[in-house]
Image (cartoon, rainbow, N blue to C red):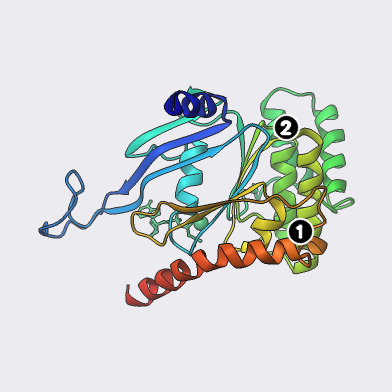
Amino acid sequence: MTSMMSSLKSAAAAINLSKITCTFASLAKPVARPGDRPGVGAGDYTAVCEASLTVARGEFVSVVGPTGCGKSTLLNIAAGLIAPTAGEVTVFGTPLKGINRHAGYLFQSDALLPWMSAVDNVIVGLIFRGIRRADALERGHQWLARVGLSGHGHKYPHQLSGGMKKRLSPAQVLINDPDILLMDEPFSALDIQTRQLMENELLDLWSADRKSVLFITHDLEEAISLSDRVVVLSAGPETRPIGEFAITLPRPRDVAEVRMTPGFLELHKQIWDILKAEVQKGYRQGLAA
Ligand SMILES: Nc1ncnc2c1ncn2[C@@H]1O[C@H](COP(=O)(O)OP(=O)(O)OP(=O)(O)O)[C@@H](O)[C@H]1O
Ligand SMILES: [Mg+2]
């Protein structure tokens, strides 16, 4: 009964990662040592091991974990950019083969085309899908306004500040109206005020049409203030989820104000109790490498 319930739940999910393992092959092949995992070559690196993660339709899920633990790897697997070594990915109940066409992806670094103006970068997906240029441009300028870049559409990426480029990326993805948003630390390079403006804008958009969101961040406060659920990953190697917290803070939320509420502080304490040890472990491993 329980397994029937869980398979019904995962069939309905926007994204279901089931027992995902991801091993990166080493180019240099040292001699095998006793204790190496079967099927894993000596020197290969198992970044993620038997990790399961679900994003329900319309749910906003954040994943936090120490640097280098495998957050981007999991997101790349959900995007179909990396095929897992083992495990299964389903998108709206269908096994994922190749690129996830239901998803828009905000990379950790921006993905702007340097030879195109800001507005052309924003509308590139619409043009690719055959939308008339005049219609695409109208929508492109609306999106530029939403991310605070009205009047900058004619500029090329090298003529924009780092923060402006960061704000262009969400417009570039959201204009295509994807069912699923995969976001990899999209606001990490922004100053705190712009970052909070962008986070509130994202929440407004999300509450308007409830996209399914998988949001990667190393910032626990950002994760709690945005999400319905926060998943904590262990330090690598062989990363997997080690904690999951429902964020029941009332919506609509203002990301700056919600951080001062007692409910937020209590959740922060609970999650940090688990995350802290992993961050310290990840840091020690980084020093030892
Ligand atoms: N293509 C690859 N080949 C070999 N190792 C890789 C590859 N991609 C990632 N890794 C390794 O897998 C681990 C997880 O990397 P990943 O980029 O997923 O971490 P992350 O949690 O996103 O880190 P950060 O918070 O710094 O962005 C790291 O140890 C990284 O070196
Ligand atoms: Mg990353």
| Residue at image location 70% in from the left, 49% down from the top | 248
Residue 177 got which mark? Answer: 2
Number of residue marks = 2
Q: Which tag, 2 or 1, sits closer to the chain's start?
A: 1
Placement of 174 over or under 193, stated as above or below = above
Q: Does the residue labelled 2 lie within 8 Å of ligand 2?
A: no
Q: Residue tagged by mark 1? A: 164
Quarter holding the N terminus is top left
Q: Which amino acid does label 1 sit on?
A: Met
Nearer to the camera, 159 or 260:
260
| Image position, residue 128 (x, y; %) | 66, 28
Residue neighbourhood size for the residue with mark 2, other residues' Cα within 10 Å, grouped as few (<14), some (14–19), many (≥20): few
Give the residue at the far front of this rendering: 1
| Image position, residue 155 (x, y; %) | 79, 53
Q: Does the residue labelled 1 lie within 8 Å of ligand 2?
A: no
Placement of 200 over or under 278, stated as above or below = above
User: Is 134 left or right of 16, judged from the image as shown?
Assistant: right
- Contact between marks 2 and 1 (CB within 8 A): the answer is no
For ligand 1, the image quadrant comes to bottom left
User: Is 235 left or right of 132, judged from the image as shown?
Assistant: left
| Residue at image location 50% in from the left, 34% down from the top | 16
| Image position, residue 118 (x, y; %) | 76, 48
| Image position, residue 215 (x, y; %) | 61, 49
Whether residue 160 appears in this view of the structure is no
Whether residue 18 appears in this view of the structure is yes
SS type, badge 2: loop
